[in-house]
Amino acid sequence: MIQNSMEAVAYELQEQSNGSHLALIYMQNPPVNALSKAVRLGLIKAVKQALADDSVKAIVILSKQSLFSGGADISEFASGDYEPPLPTVLDLIENATKPVIAVLNGPAFGGGLEVALSCHYRVTFAANKVGLPEVNLGILPGAGGTQRLPRLAGVQQALDMIVSGRPVAASKLPGVFDLVVADPAQLLSEALTFCQKVLSQGGLIRKTCDLTIDSSTAPAELFNQYRQGIAKQARGFFAPERCIQAVEAAVTLPFVQGLQREGELFLECMQSKQARAQQHFFFAERAASHVKDYDKTTPVRDIKKVGIIGAGTMGGGIAMNFVNAGIPVTLLELKQEALDKGLALIRRNYESSAKKGKLTAAQVEERMALLQGTTDYADLADVDLVIEAVFEKMEVKHEVFKALDKVCKPGVILASNTSTLDLNEIASATKRPQDVIGMHFFSPANVMKLLEVVKGEHSSPEVIKTVMQLAKKINKVAVLVGVCFGFVGNRMIESYGREANRMMLEGVKPEQLDQVIYDFGLPMGPFTMGDMAGQDIGYFVRQSRQEFIKHDPSYCILADKLVEQGRVGLKAGKGVYLYAEGSRAPIPDPKVLELAEQEALRLGISQRNISEQEMLERIMFPLINEGALILEEGIAAKSSDIDVIYVYGYGFPVYRGGPMQYADEIGLLTVYEAMCKYRDELGEYGQHWFEPAPLLKKLAQQGKRFADL
Ligand code: NAD
């Protein structure tokens, strides 16, 4: 990052045929032209210099990077040093007495777009993208974006851009750009011709702030309808509503008061827990790819072709990821029938995307053509990576890895999608454990963004690096984890199901608990989730883990009894809830409560009223506690990695930043003390399951956070 305003902004004069000058002000703050202090200072200095120079007739703001500007320098947020504030810079630009023209040679986001909006003219190329993504950081554009964009782009377009944070192609923003050239290579020369035209026509100064919005085009109903339209995806989020209010202010208030209102709303957002959480998550996601297991010098293997073993639920979805990225896949099944079924399901998925207009018929065929089915291991002789997604049994995994060891060429990466089995034991079936790694996809594998990359005892740095980088190519967010039962995500979720079941025995109704968790911000509560995934999945896992749970006779006993009665969830029309034919809406079943009462009586558990706070704490705190153990054991390298896993793999609300950030926000002492309280109050059960992790205890007592580690 450049610290010096002279370096961050370059000033050049370009002589015109009549001897006058254009001042070219280049932002040059690699890599993304973030509007750091040095850039803001540099812009002020350069604009003042241009204004003071009588030979300069117009000012052009452009960039020496591939982006016009990526926006605010988020790393400055923590310091609280905003001087000089961006609005001051933009005020200077907008009120300049010479025409100012922004030439966008690349994307402009957030503050970058706000710079352009404060100029008097804007020029770019058609495919260029601009956007105001602040909402994704829990804030809103705070340098006039919410006031200027509606004046230029129209209220509806501005609402869409500001509330969704999504970038839009310049070609779709005729109100924003005065000239949109087709060919980016021609941009600079056409932009300079445009400047000359502006000057030849009298050098009109057009301030965005002077434009008015016809309020009849943006009645109150428009905003209310907009609110209703986004209610589902914005559930629980603080910033989107403030974004709407800011745009409303652009319609109802004069510019200066509108700016003030924007400032107040910006501050409200900036000081919210959600902004802290979302900004934490922004960095967490980026930090997930920084791992210590390899460095710049570690070679990366070329993955040109992939083999996948097993065309079931996971294998099919995994195959689609590679095919979507243009990487050919050979899909292997034991029997032709299973193979045909798997391939037909993939085709159906693509055809359904085509029906929704997401793919053309030709693209469906192109993707299917990249998929080759086989029942013969010899067809894997030319692949560079194999991902195994067969039944979750060690014998079957061994059989597959032995077969792979025989047919695959040297240097092939052998990956397993196992959710629970010991990767090191799987690797031991081969003569090349250094090439074995876990690639734990989440279901549906073609949709879920998360990939847990599991490093085995012998996985080589080269193999780890290749897989971490490959994840990006197939549009996944990879988090590197170590080997243990359930790895990070599923290991932590174990307590979630356990506590939910136990609280039902203690008198909680499933719909009450599900509501508490839904209101916390997860897409659904544990009972709905269990029914959707199939209660039998957990049942089989428990059967194989009796030695770890048999000391607790209450352990998921209700779920076990329900499965034994054939109540395996949605697919059976009954689980913890009942489901009407063809409906996914859970219907509470009094029979389940009766069963809970009987079991509680049998186990000597007294039923009582449990508060919503207790429900939330008993669901969330053991999960966080397990996260602390995972950190202590080095299964996850940093607490932010756990947050990434929970947001992308389990729908943990991003506005809470993930479970570890949530714990940091409420304070580790709160979590620790509550763990101690439940340990002491819940008798033998509490002693088994609520012992605080030593790391949690230590950090709580030192007044520290997981993020401090
Ligand atoms: P599945 O039963 O849907 O599919 C397994 C497929 O493997 C079947 O089509 C089967 O015919 C095939 N198969 C079995 N043995 C084989 C062999 N020796 N050679 C070739 N093909 C063989 O199971 P799934 O849900 O896709 O799970 C597969 C793996 O993925 C398991 O290890 C599981 O733990 C893991 N996983 C599952 C999920 C999930 O939500 N379903 C999530 C993450 C990981």
Image (cartoon, rainbow, N blue to C red):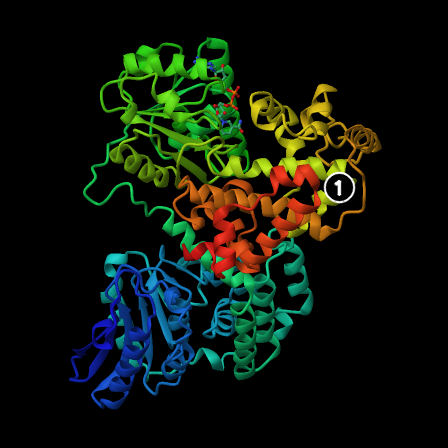
Q: Is mark 1 within 8 Å of ligand 1?
A: no
Residue 264 in view of the camera: yes
What is the x, y in percent for residue 508?
77, 41
| Vertical position of residue 35 compared to residue 687: above or below | below
Q: Nearer the viewer, residue 407 or 147?
A: 407
| Vertical position of residue 334 compared to residue 212: above or below | above
Task: Tell me the quarter of the image containing the C terminus.
Answer: bottom left
Rendered residue at 55%/63% (across/down):
273
Looking at the image, residue 363 sits to the left or right of residue 646; the answer is left
Report which quarter residue 684 is drawn in.
top right
Looking at the image, residue 210 sits to the left or right of residue 9; the answer is right
SS under mark 1: helix
Q: Nearer the viewer, residue 478 or 8?
A: 478
What is the x, y in percent for residue 204?
36, 83
Report which quarter residue 462 is drawn in.
top left
What is the x, y in percent for residue 61?
29, 73
Residue 162 in view of the camera: no
Name the kind of residue labelled 1 in the image. Glu
Rendered residue at 64%/65% (across/down):
223
Can you identify the residue that label 1 sits on?
A: 511
Q: Residues within 10 Å of mark 1 (few under 14, many from 20)?
A: some
| Vertical position of residue 581 compared to residue 260: above or below | above
Q: Nearer the viewer, residue 293 or 247?
A: 293
Q: Nearer the viewer, residue 90 or 409?
A: 409
